Amino acid sequence: MMSGDRILGAFAGLAIGDAAGWPSSRHRAGVHAPWSRRLHRELDAFAEEHRVTTLPVPFALNQPVAPLVTGPSDDAEWLAWTVLTIDQDRAEAFAGLIGRDDIRARISVRTALDNLARGLGPPASGHDNPHFFDDAAVVRAVAFGAAGLDPTADAQVTNAGDGVLGAVAMARAIAVLVDGGSMGDAVQAALEALPDDTVIGRATRTALAVTREAGDPFAAVPALDAALFDHVYSYGVAAAETLPVALALAEVSGGSTRTAVPAAACLAAAADSAPALTGALTGAFAGHDALPRGWSTTLTGCCLPELAGIDLLDIARGWIG
């Protein structure tokens, strides 16, 4: 029987992890005027030109500072959108976003919307996509796992290959956890969805091996960095990197959000979503009542403006009844 506390834990854990990653403040800065981000880029160029190590961080100047207070950003908002549209045909749900110039989304989602607008539906909308491998669908799969549903139809709108496999694995792991299962059982359920001969399957097994050898999440950070990230190009949201990190750290931490999420946030190359996925897994294991207090779950509307000011947990509570 699925636990409401564990479902809330999955959502709150994702929001906590989303907030913990360094890209979160940059996403939330998207609600500010474009000139503020232009100034940020100019400061970055100044630092590069003059070889100074004082790097710019998101700032508000004469605008409201609230969006820059530690809190969730893109992953939490797309999870909220998924819950609010989960009963719709998935291609139709995404088609409702076509033509909107006020949303922010991953490259896979943007390309899928362009494909849908041209009449190219799933699975081609996800396959004929330069970022078919990203983890946008893995984030959305938290909702499907919490509901005990298969995320494949949703994932195929925006992704293919590792992107779809990762979504299925995440949903299966979350489903096990909200049903009261152990973290070990959840990881095993995820592995069964990740064939050995795929990039994401090999990476997940490698990540689990190096974290088990390290013995704890923080000790595993250098080993995970060496084993999974080649740092050749900017693929910070590749499902074959972020999901393995999340599963491995969730397992080696014994399901502890307090130790697993900070370790995930230390992996700069994966910090856009690995902490959020890690938080979803550990939160689903521990339950909402066991999570650290003080972390906001209120959305800023940085990706979907209509969600500004809404608490992700209010959406979750209304959904689970």
Image (cartoon, rainbow, N blue to C red):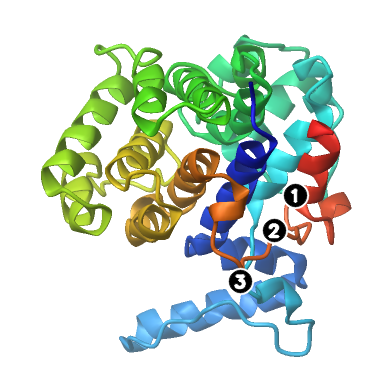
- Looking at the image, which residue is at 55% across and 74% down? 41
Using residue 73 as the reference point, say whether residue 210 is left or right of it.
left
Give yes or no for contact between labels 2 and 3 (Cβ–Cβ under 8 Å): no
Which residue has dot 2 on it?
297
- Which of 2 and 55 lies nearest the eye of the viewer? 2
Judging from the image, what secondary structure is the residue with disc 2 in? Answer: loop
Which residue has dot 1 on it?
313
- Which badge, 2 or 3, is on the more N-terminal residue? 3
Tag nearer the camera, 2 or 3? 2
Q: Position of residue 107 (x, y in %)?
A: 58, 38
- Looking at the image, which residue is at 25% across and 11% down? 197
- Which badge, 1 or 3, is on the more N-terminal residue? 3
- Looking at the image, which residue is at 84% across and 56% down? 310
Answer with the quarter of the image where residue 114 lies.
top right
Q: Residues within 10 Å of mark 3 (few under 14, many from 20)?
A: some
Judging from the image, what secondary structure is the residue with disc 1 in? Answer: helix
Answer with the quarter of the image where residue 54 lies.
bottom left
- Looking at the image, which residue is at 72% across and 76% down? 35
The quadrant in which the N terminus is found is top right
Give yes or no for contact between labels 1 and 2 (Cβ–Cβ under 8 Å): yes
Which residue has dot 3 on it?
70
- Residue 18 visible, this angle: no
Q: Separation of disc 1 and disc 2 at Cα?
A: 7 Å
- Which badge, 1 or 2, is on the more N-terminal residue? 2
Q: Amino acid at mark 1?
A: Leu
Q: Amino acid at mark 3?
A: Thr
Q: Position of residue 92 (x, y in %)?
A: 83, 18
